[in-house]
Amino acid sequence: MASAPQHRGHRWLQQGQFDLNNQNSYEAADFGGQSQQPQPQHQQSFSYADNNQQQQFEQVRLKGGAGWYDEGRRNEQTEIWGYNPYDYDPFSGTAGGANDVNTSSFLTALELNAVVFLVLIGSYEVFRRLFPNVYSPKSSGTRTRRRSDDSSGGDRLRAGGDCGAAPAVNMTTRLPLGWVSSVVRTSWSTVRSAGGLDSYMFLRYIRLCFRITFTSALWGIIILWPVYATGGGGAGGWYFLSMANLTQGSQKLWIPTTFIWLQTLYVIFLMSDEYKHYLECRVDFLARGEGMVTNVQHMYSLIVERIPHELRGDRALFDYFNRLFPGKVHSTAVVLNLPDLERESQRRKRVQRRLEKSLVYLEATGRRPRHVVGRKRIRCCGIESSPLFFGGKSSNSNSDEDGEVLRRGEKVDSINYYTRELSLMNERMSRMQHDKIELAQKGNDTVRASQWISHAIDRVSTVSNRALSGNRQSQDDGLITSFDESRRNRRKPLALIILDRIGIDFISGGLDYIQQNIDEVVDSVVGVTMSSTGFISFKDLSTLACAVKTPLFHKPDVLVVRMAPEPRDLIWENAHVNQAWSRGREFTANTLLAVGAILWSIPVASIQALATVDTLASVTGMDWIQTLHGGRVASFVNGYLPVVLLLVIIMVLPHIFYAVALYYEDRKTQSDVQRSVIGRYFYYQLANIFITVTAGSILESLNEIVEHPTNILAILGKTLPNVVGYFVAFVMTKMLCGLPIVLLRLPPLMRTVFKKVVFREKYLTQSELDELQYPIKFRQLWYGWEYPNLLLVITICFVYSCISPVILPVGSAFFGLAWLIYKNQILTVFDPGYESGGLMFPMACHRTLIGLICGQLTLAGYSIIRGGFYQALVIFPLPIITIKMLGVFKTLYIDPGECISVERAVELDAHNPMAASSFDADVYRQPVLAETIVEPQMRQDSALSSLCKSITVNLLFRVDETNRSKLISTLSSWLTELKLCEVTRHFIKSLLSSTSLYNYVNPS
């Protein structure tokens, strides 16, 4: 026997013996074929050093009589990887790789999933009639109310674009599945207007995947199925229509090679068309704000990062850009770090919420609520409990009149207490907002800012004049931190020159670099008030196009600009974070998550080792589980508990990625957070597929590849093609169970039922009723969760499209049903809270091509194993072409979609020269600075609502103190004549006699 490498991946080289006497013990039915007769014993040694390896293996395969999946192959797999992949049940979670699912098991699973599908669809048909606010809030006319304290400067309701708009789909039909025809007939323009450009491109991506899989399935049935069926390899089951049924080194291997070439070109062709359409939609979005845009001013605005200290102020930033683009700047806004103001705003919202709760309690019971100062309240599902009133010390003082500060533990009248607190907080918030806005306008140092601007402009002018006059003399490129020209041109002392020559300048430069990074860390950690982020709005698009495409400063890391996101897309809590600090944390997170993907086999192996009956039986009092029902319960637990735990971990992953992007990396937009989740979740799913199939560690495989680089294709070729039945069942289950669950919307349904059962509506405030009817969290389409699920299926289809094309019809059916269900949800349910202009679509297409490369490499590796060395050489250029197309698509479509072209901008400015007349200088002002004085929101169905608002707002707060007493007496007599209940009259009179409500409202 030839010498073999001494590592775990090649232990079979030392043993390498195949015993085929027990061929009958192997269930050939696992592959859909018949049991083979026993064959004579045949032993054969294998070695990478043996040049006749392929011929020897072919002899073993033919004598084994079970096609590619004979007993010899099983033993070889066991010795290569140290495990037997056929000892693992994908639904049992036991050790080993993912076992294949035979055709009979697949049919059984299909019947079970079909029953589940019918039950879920039937449940949807019933529940959509019982809970229209959950399943068709747009069609049912459920309007979402946006409170003033929850809206940002740019969060203005679009005309006719809320949930009360005309429904796009008729969901009131009583016919079962009657909504399907309406969804299918709905035009793409309606989808775009109903869901925005992000949802529109998401649905276009599903259609792209459907076209790829449907066309590939059609031609696979016509071309590949007959070729594989007549291959003569003796394979059965799934593999009768796969490359496994071709004989070793067959000339028919050229057919799948040609097919993968045609499929790759077809995918590139379709993706090019979709990218063209994306660019058109993206340009329209940047030019006219099409989609779910609430304010078009963001199309004329830029976000500026890494603003120098001298320009960190609204006035300084305005002056600088106004010097660069005279008369073209509309407004500027520098983001402030306002933790104190944000805390005060949160406290005021809590007081407002509790005042509303107290008023509702008064109306519902007729009794004035009392509570103990400082006592906590229970909050569940966004609904706060009434105060727990027991114990405490009674207070005889009237907090509304004498202004005495009440101590913790005292019993007080809730309405009077929270009314006074709200009045004080309104006054305090107004003062703090005024101070912060003045600070934003003034900036850090007005004098230094003026000097910085003048010096920067003079510097640019000097360089331009020298260039025009032909003077090529080099100019100092130091940092602009001093404005003394003589000091800048001063000659260094001889001692410093000598020190620089011996390397001291290297140390000095390193210290300067460290100091620069320390300053950035201090800005982010200590939290200076004036941040390095700001926004600029221009008066026309042509100026904006020039500004975003032109280097504004001679140093590339100063004044970095890009198109501003929509105000609703911004995460204002992170907007002040320094860009360099955020990028550094992003690098750290990517490194740690990459290590986690490499070590992903550790939690998988831990689950498989711990989630067993033996482990449970070791717990005191649980030994009975091993013998319950004759051991059938033990088999069930061993089969499903590991899978359930693994699925739970996988389901938790996107939540972890979301938290990392939002709270650790401090990303500034919701769309950026979703893009980060898409990329990371996709790669973790690929890692999970690899581990599930091979039951090995990615780290071990990397070691194998490092020691034997030529084995990278063999690893893919030996593992993935062997479990096509497993993935067919996987895609089928996602189609028949996963997609109906998306339609059924279990989380909001359970939340709604829970609230209706536990809470009484008469004790709920208007904001709590709004959250009960249509919670904000569940009206969003979470792209970071949905895109990776689609990417996983299309990647599986690419991997098996040529090796075993039976998966393509199942994948096509999945994307067809996904298109129908998600289109229905976009038209009737999802109401996006922001609009990024389809920025998630290019990332999804990029990951799709990564999946295509995985399929190409897998086919190349499998072709080598099947003796198709020349076919593998022909396939080899495809990954290179695909990688090249990634760059081509970025250059042709992604980069041009980042901003509008100058030519298009000039045309639009000529068509709409007065666009800036409707702009607001506070659109990009932080919401906490734009909050107005708040008052309790009354329930819409309350008798107090319209009456109190008309009295307290329209009358009382518009008169002076002299006429107020006369108005109160007139209103009191008028209230006596009204046929109102005693509670209502008492409440309104208490409002009229209260000075606190009048005090905190600005009479102007």
Image (cartoon, grey):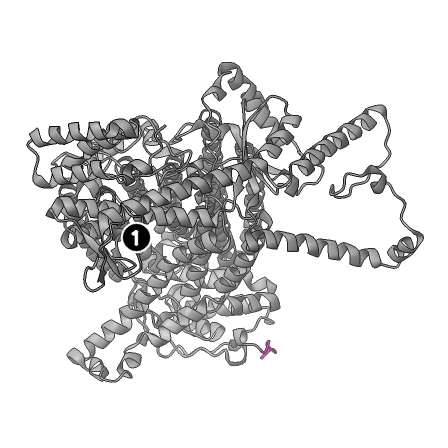
Disc 1 designates what residue? 734
**Which image quarter holds the C terminus?**
top left
Q: Does the magenta stretch include residue 3?
A: yes
The quadrant in which the N terminus is found is bottom right
Taking depth in this image into account, of 108 and 531 the one nearest to the observer is 531
Residue 173, position as x, y percentages in the image:
14, 34
Please name whichever residue, 925 or 961, is drawn nearer the observer in this view of the structure.
Answer: 961
3 shown above or below 677: below
Main SS of the magenta part reads: loop
Up-down relation of residue 98 to residue 465 (above or below): below
- Residue 606 is at least partly visible in this image: yes
Task: Say whether residue 878 is left or right of residue 616.
Answer: right
Q: Where is residue 591 in the image (x, y as percent from the top left)?
A: 55, 60
Query: Which of the pair 364/751 is nearer the observer?
Result: 364
Any part of residue 744 in sight = no
Q: Is mark 1 on a helix, strand or loop?
A: helix
Taking the image as shown, residue 533 lies to the left or right of residue 766, namely: right
Q: Where is residue 298 in the image (x, y as percent from the top left)?
A: 48, 31
Viewer-closest of 794 and 278: 278
| 276 within the magenta span | no
Tell me the residue at 76%/32% (across/down): 459
Query: Label 1 is placed on what type of residue?
Result: Lys
Residue appearing at x 39%, y 52% in the figure: 228
- Residue 48 picture quarter: bottom right
* Residues shaded magenta: 1-6
Q: Which residue is drawn at 68% across and 41% down?
A: 556
Residue 71, position in %: x, y? 39, 72
Against 627, is 859 above or below? above
306 displayed left or right of 782: right
